[in-house]
Amino acid sequence: MKRILLATVAMTALGSATVLAADLPQRPAYKATPVMMAPPPTWTGCYIGGNVGAGWSHTDVNDEISGAPIVSLSGTGIVGGGQVGCDYQFAGNWVIGVQGMFDGSGLKSDVSSTILSPADTLHGSIPWFATATARLGYVVVPNLLVYAKGGGAWTHTDASLLVSGAVVDTSSFDQSGWTAGGGAEWMFAPNWSVFAEYDYLGFTDKTVTLASGANIGTVHQNVQVGLIGVNFRFSGLFH
């Protein structure tokens, strides 16, 4: 009889505990918050930026009839300016784009020659040059683009003849030509990139006449530049 009573009490207590447990509020099941991965950077978009660097110019002045050399000038100087462009990333890692660049220049040089008449010294300077190019690049890693570029080039040259240090005649002229180069660009923040590049600019020959009407000769000229720069990229506007 005592055993039956104990068993009944135990069963009653167990049933009460089960009911109490069922009445308790249930904890919601824990779910891990999914981690949002940042999308990989894209080179698609337009940009504007600035650049600075060093330039080298070489100018040959030849007789306009015989082609015989008269003088050669070589100059160095600081260059700097700005660029605008747009890129489009396609087929995974390929990037195609267009760019316009305008740079002021400190390129200048002087040469003395007894062939020049009646000059003692020929002075030349290139105050600016500009390019309009297409470029093709490859994304080596998501933030690093290597590229080649090529297109048209334009420049302005001021020339003067001096005798005993005094200017006796002047000329200013423009030339057009072509450019080719390449470089690398690193996207260090979502909308910012830095680049380094080398460009060669070759210009068509031009026969130059001084203000007095006398000919200097046919000018054959090229410019080389090494540039570093920064771009602000508007890629967010395209997504």
Image (cartoon, helix red, strand yellow):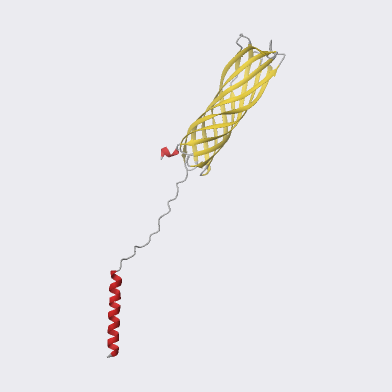
Q: Vertically, is 57 above or below 95?
A: above
Q: Quadrant of residue 120?
A: top right
Q: Nearer the viewer, residue 192 or 114?
A: 192
Residue at the farthest right position: 114
Residue 231 image position (x, y, % from top left): 51, 35
Q: Quadrant of residue 239?
A: top left
Name the residue: 58% across, 16% down. 172
Name the residue: 57% across, 23% down. 128
Q: Quadrant of the N terminus?
A: bottom left
Name the residue: 55% across, 27% down. 103
Q: Nearer the viewer, residue 76 or 113?
A: 76
Q: Vertically, is 70 above or below 225?
A: above
Residue at the farthest top position: 212
Q: Nearer the viewer, residue 67 or 115?
A: 115
Describe residue 238's horizontal placement relative to residue 8 as left or right.
right
Q: Quadrant of residue 217?
A: top right
Residue 94 image position (x, y, % from top left): 50, 40
Q: Nearer the viewer, residue 102 or 133?
A: 102
Residue 65 image position (x, y, % from top left): 65, 13
